[in-house]
């Protein structure tokens, strides 16, 4: 049984080595992270070369540094549930190894009893197999439990970390509008994260299954296949990007259905076909076919040949001590049992060689996840990467150089003041070069001008959605400004949630606002009949479809009365409301002390404001008080 003992020892040592490898990475992940920080972003994330292309995704030093960086998130401490599941998986793999060896031995004895027509031995070994079936099944399912739980926990931790950064402030908006490095964040945050976590756990499992014997074959074949698989990482990155773009283009059809009553435009159909990138998918499939052929030869069949060569050595060597004391039948039985063990070992070895393919594929997902982490970190730090050089070229003649985030924001209550602030879009289009005006609480301002003059841009800067390109902006804190759009958002939830959004019921109670007060807000905007119709504040409906356009606008005004901000920005938010209700809403805002910035083309609203800010769309603006003559002219 020499071959058997070698097999068992080698395989268990490999599993133990897998555990030690994980603990080593956990212990030294901080040291490696610091070293990566010293070497710069080029060793941690996907770099951008001079020609704008990103580094290829390959199994190299950069890949391992990236894995360690992400491992710090998925396994935050040495002693945590993730580590416990890693240990459980390793333990179950060791236990299953013993079970496999026992089943080979017991199966050999059952077959020997059948061939030898020994009813007694057949019953003994058969009942022994039946007796151990529950234990073997339990070990196998514990292994599956550990693998599935580890995948879920890895995904949970990584997703939470990414979403904490993605939803911080307005990062989700900035990623889609101020930075063009990540085209489809939803693809990365959902499918790519899931595939990455599954790939990591599968790789750990496969590496823990293999024996340490015949490592020379593993090293040679692994290096050879890894070299051949290098294009897979880059092709995976390209495939996922195309899939994300294809998914995004298809999602636009939903928006089209809501806004148009016509067939899908031919131009958009052509764009979908272009984004689909069938040629790339065909090339990827053919490459996988070629690599699958090579993998089968090297990792499966050639590994079996190596197993036969190893198991044959002690039997074909006539000077081996085994031949001195064993009969021919004993040698045949020993060979049969040991051969089955060696075949299992060669299969495990093949899984290790194939793990190189999984590692190459993992490098592609790792590159995308790391790039997302880098962009989120920089966006939260106020750093954007867009065509800022072109902005400087546009304004070089006027010696105006725009740097995003170079302006200063000062938080102060009851005042909004733009002091020599350029109003520009993230693309570098300058709308107003030097914007200066001041508004204090109690003063309502009407903002007017043609489409594209900068009205929405002004409020995006005011709401800190867009960076400040210079000058100084004095304003209340973000929570003391409230924006009411023309098409208000109706959240998923109850009738109460529509009024108090984005607050929760607990936050409503902390503010000391009762349901009776909420009813008064609805009555103020003539929506009390909705509560009477539903019968309770906890009624849940699809409010986007239940409420009409005018009801949604009035619900948004009730929401405004609930929050009572210092300043409110009303962007055509009463266009579907009757004039009498509109007059009451503006009068009530003045009564409760809400100062208004109104964007509207309704002439009847001039009388509710003290100043007007007019932008002509050519870089000029006027900020003047509204007089009786102005009101008469407007009316």
Image (cartoon, grey):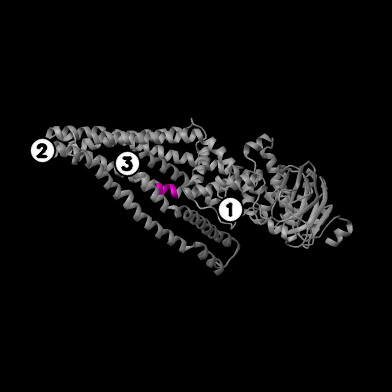
Tell me the quarter of the image containing the C terminus: bottom right
Can residue 128 be seen in the rendering of this structure? yes
Identify residue for label 2.
Answer: 117
Main SS, magenta region, reads helix
Name the disc covering residue 132, or none. none
Looking at the rendered image, the disc whose residue lies closer to the viewer, 3 or 1, is: 3
Identify residue for label 3.
Answer: 214
Tell me the quarter of the image containing the N terminus: top left
Looking at the rendered image, the disc whose residue lies closer to the viewer, 2 or 3, is: 3
The first of marks 2 and 1 along the sequence is 1
The first of marks 2 and 3 along the sequence is 2
Circle 3 packing at 10 Å, graded few (<14), some (14-19), many (20+), is some
Q: Is residue 136 left or right of residue 30?
A: left
Identify residue for label 1.
Answer: 48
Residue at the far bottom: name it: 266
CA–CA distance in space, label 3 to label 1? 41 Å
The residue shown at (32%, 41%) is 214
Secondary structure, mark 2, is loop
Residue at the far left: name it: 117
Can residue 531 be seen in the rendering of this structure? no
Rendered image quadrant of residue 143: top left
Secondary structure, mark 1, is loop
> Can you give x and y, in whole percent of width and height, for residue 21 in the image?
43, 36
Give 184 or 70, whichever is nearer the viewer.
Answer: 70
Q: Is residue 286 left or right of residue 458?
A: left
Range drawn in magenta:
356-360
């Amino acid at each position: 049984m020499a071959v058997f003992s070698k097999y068992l020892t080698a395989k268990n040592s490999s599993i133990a080595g897998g555990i030690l490898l994980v603990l080593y990475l956990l212990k030294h992940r901080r040291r490696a992270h610091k070293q990566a920080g010293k070497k710069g972003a080029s060793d941690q994330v996907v770099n951008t070369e001079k020609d704008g292309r990103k580094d290829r995704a390959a199994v190299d030093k950069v890949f391992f540094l990236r894995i360690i960086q992400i491992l710090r998130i998925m396994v935050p401490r040495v002693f945590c549930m993730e580590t416990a599941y890693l240990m459980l998986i390793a333990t179950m793999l060791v236990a299953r190894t013993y079970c496999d060896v026992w089943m080979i031995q017991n199966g050999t004895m059952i077959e020997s009893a059948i061939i030898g027509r020994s009813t007694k031995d057949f019953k003994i070994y058969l009942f022994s197999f039946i007796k151990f079936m529950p234990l073997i099944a339990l070990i196998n399912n514990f292994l599956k439990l550990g693998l599935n739980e580890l995948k879920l926990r890895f995904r949970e931790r990584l997703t939470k970390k990414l979403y904490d950064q993605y939803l911080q402030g307005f990062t989700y908006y900035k990623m889609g509008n101020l930075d063009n490095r990540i085209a489809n964040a939803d693809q990365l945050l959902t499918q790519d994260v899931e595939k990455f976590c599954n790939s990591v756990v599968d790789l750990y499992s496969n590496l823990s299954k293999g024996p340490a014997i015949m490592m020379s074959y593993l090293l040679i074949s692994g290096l050879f296949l890894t070299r051949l698989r290098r294009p897979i990482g880059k092709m995976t990155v390209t495939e996922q990007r195309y899939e994300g773009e294809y998914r995004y283009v298809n999602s636009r059809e939903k928006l089209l259905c809501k806004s148009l009553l016509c067939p899908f435009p031919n131009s958009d159909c052509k764009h979908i076909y272009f984004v689909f990138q069938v040629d790339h998918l065909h090339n990827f499939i053919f490459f996988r076919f070629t690599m699958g052929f090579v993998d089968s030869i090297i990792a499966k069949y050639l590994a079996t040949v190596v197993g036969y060569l190893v198991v044959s050595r002690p039997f074909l060597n006539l000077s081996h001590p085994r031949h001195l004391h064993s009969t021919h039948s004993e040698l045949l039985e020993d060979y049969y049992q040991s051969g089955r063990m060696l075949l299992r070992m060669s299969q495990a070895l093949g899984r290790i060689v194939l793990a190189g393919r999984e590692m190459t594929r993992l490098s592609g997902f790792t590159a995308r996840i790391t790039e997302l982490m880098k962009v989120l970190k920089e966006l939260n730090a106020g750093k954007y990467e867009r065509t800022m050089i072109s902005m400087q070229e546009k304004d070089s003649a006027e010696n105006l150089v725009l740097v995003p985030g170079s302006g200063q924001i000062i938080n102060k209550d009851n005042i909004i003041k733009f002091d020599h602030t350029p109003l520009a879009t993230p693309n570098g289009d300058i709308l107003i070069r030097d914007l200066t005006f001041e508004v204090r609480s109690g003063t309502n301002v009407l903002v007017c001008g043609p489409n594209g003059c900068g009205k929405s841009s002004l409020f995006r800067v005011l709401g800190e959605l867009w960076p400040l390109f210079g000058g100084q902006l004095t304003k209340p804190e973000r929570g003391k400004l409230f924006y009411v759009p023309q098409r208000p958002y109706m959240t998923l939830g109850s009738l109460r949630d529509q009024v108090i959004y984005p607050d929760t019921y607990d936050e409503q109670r902390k503010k000391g606002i009762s349901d009776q007060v909420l009813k008064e807000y609805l009555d103020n905007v003539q929506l009390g009949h909705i509560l009477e119709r539903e019968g309770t504040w906890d009624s849940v409906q699809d409010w986007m479809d239940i409420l009409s356009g005018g009801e949604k606008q009035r619900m948004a005004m009730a929401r405004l009365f609930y929050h009572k901000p210092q300043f409110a920005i009303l962007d055509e938010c009463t266009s579907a409301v009757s004039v009498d209700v509109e007059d009451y809403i503006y009068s009530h805002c003045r009564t409760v002390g809400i100062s208004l910035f109104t964007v509207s083309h309704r002439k009847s609203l001039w009388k509710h404001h003290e100043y007007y800010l007019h932008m002509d769309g050519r870089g000029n603006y006027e900020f003047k008080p509204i007089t009786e003559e102005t009101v008469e002219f407007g009316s």
